[in-house]
Amino acid sequence: MGMSVIITPAAQGDAEQILKLQYLGYQSEAELYGDWGLEPLTQTLDSLRAELADGHAVVARLGDEVVGAVRGRVDAEGTGRIGRLVVHPRMQRHGLGRRLLEAVEQSLLDEGGVRAFELFTGHRSLGNLRLYTRLGYHQTSVREVSGRLSVVTLRKPAVVPLAASA
């Protein structure tokens, strides 16, 4: 039968696949906002490799193919900053975004010191907003970037599992 998708920490060797997936996955966002200069579409491989070395990254794998990815880091204030959640277009609407987000949240919690999680998306990205709301995120601000784009920031408290707090 078919292979199942597994969620694992990203490795440096995944950088090229993640960058290609990011480029493919953010095409719909670029079209939605009429802006092909979005940072995920212009990021360099060296910049991505530096992010992978410096933070937490999780990927969804279907065999050897990376079909989803997300990155996160904990800032000095204890906020787990999550970004660049992307799922291959053919794999969307199967729960991978949720699984990836939960996995990176857990990875950040395991590091310790996380008091809250924060992420952002564009105001027209309704699917993203629905997903984040379902997972407990609440809108904290909206910042207009241009006439076409406002960035919505969402946040939720970090909940440490009871077994980890005992």
Image (spheres, rainbow, N blue to C red):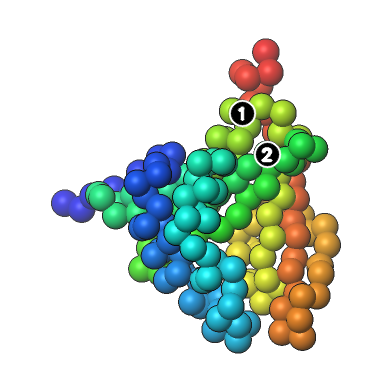
Q: Position of residue 164 (x, y in %)?
A: 63, 19
- Which amino acid type is marked by label 2? Val
- Which amino acid type is marked by label 1? Glu
- Name which residue lies at 60% across and 46% down: 72
Res. 87 in view: no
Relative to 112, does residue 58 appear above or below in the rendering?
Answer: below
In the displayed structure image, the side of residue 64 where residue 73 appears, left or right: right
Query: Do the numbered discs 2 and 1 sit on residues whose CB atoms are within 8 Å?
Result: yes
Relative to 12, does residue 69 appear above or below in the rendering?
Answer: below
Q: Compare residues 132 and 120 and report the one nearer the observer.
A: 120
- Name which residue lies at 59% across and 73% down: 38
Disc 1 marks which residue? Answer: 111
Q: Compare residues 166 and 43 and report the one nearer the observer.
A: 43
Q: Position of residue 40 (x, y in %)?
A: 54, 66
- Name which residue lies at 52% across and 65% down: 43
Res. 16 in view: yes
Disc 2 marks which residue? Answer: 74
Q: Position of residue 151 (x, y in %)?
A: 74, 69
Identify the element where label 1 is drawn: helix
In the displayed structure image, the side of residue 136 where residue 139 appears, left or right: right
In the displayed structure image, the side of residue 96 where residue 158 appears, left or right: right
- The residue sitting at the top extreme is 166
Relative to 128, does residue 33 appear above or below in the rendering?
Answer: below
In the displayed structure image, the side of residue 27 where residue 138 appears, left or right: right
**Quarter of the image with the C terminus in it:** top right
Identify the element where label 2 is drawn: strand
